[in-house]
Amino acid sequence: MPDTFQLEIVTPEKMVVRDAAEEAQIPGRNGYIGVLPGHAPLITELGAGEITFKRGGQIQHFSMAWGFAEILPDRVTVLAETVERAEEIDTNRAKQSLSEAEESLKSAHTEEDFAQALGRIRRAQARLEVAQKAK
């Protein structure tokens, strides 16, 4: 069995990653998915969170929000709405987004408003957590 799989992380604007990976953690809609070479085929919806992958003993960290992943034994493709490398995240902007999302959660009147505010909170929290790892 191979020691790596091909990992591609793509947004509508660009190819973020195209590399060999030894393992990956991807934020599924209902929890994180661990991927190793030879993983069973899977297509899944993704939530907001942190993508990590290991290459050559080094761990790479990215913040991502919403999308889909296709997992095959030798390849993983992540199609995400947004992806940011840890060192690219503006922590002041992320803190402001978190504060605004928390305020909108307090004033949510419908289930849709509540769900949107929670999604914005998850995204901002993920961005802040990933940014901390770049320091």
Image (cartoon, rainbow, N blue to C red):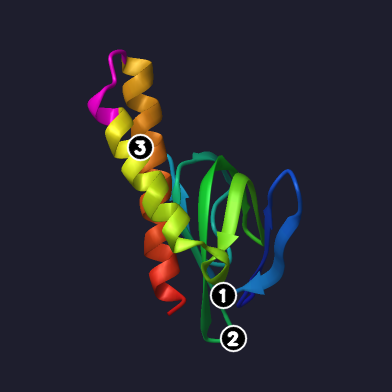
The residue drawn where x is 28% and y is 14% is: 109
Q: Amino acid at mark 1?
A: Glu
Residue at which label 3 appears: 101
For the residues carrying marks 3 and 2, which lies nearer the camera in this image?
3
Query: Distance between the Cα atoms at labels 1 and 2?
Result: 8 Å
In the picture, the disc for residue 56 is: 2
Question: Distance from label 1 to label 3 (Cα)?
Answer: 36 Å
Q: Earlier in the sequence, mark 3 or mark 2?
A: 2
Extreme residue in the left direction: 106
Q: Quadrant of the C terminus?
A: bottom left
User: In which image quadrant can residue 105 be found?
Assistant: top left
**Mark 2 or mark 1, which is nearer the start of the sequence?**
1
Q: Amino acid at mark 2?
A: Gly
Q: Report the span colored magenta.
A: 105-110
Q: Which residue is mark 1?
A: 22
Residue drawn where x is 54% and y is 52% of the image: 40
Residue 49 position, x and y percent, is 43, 52
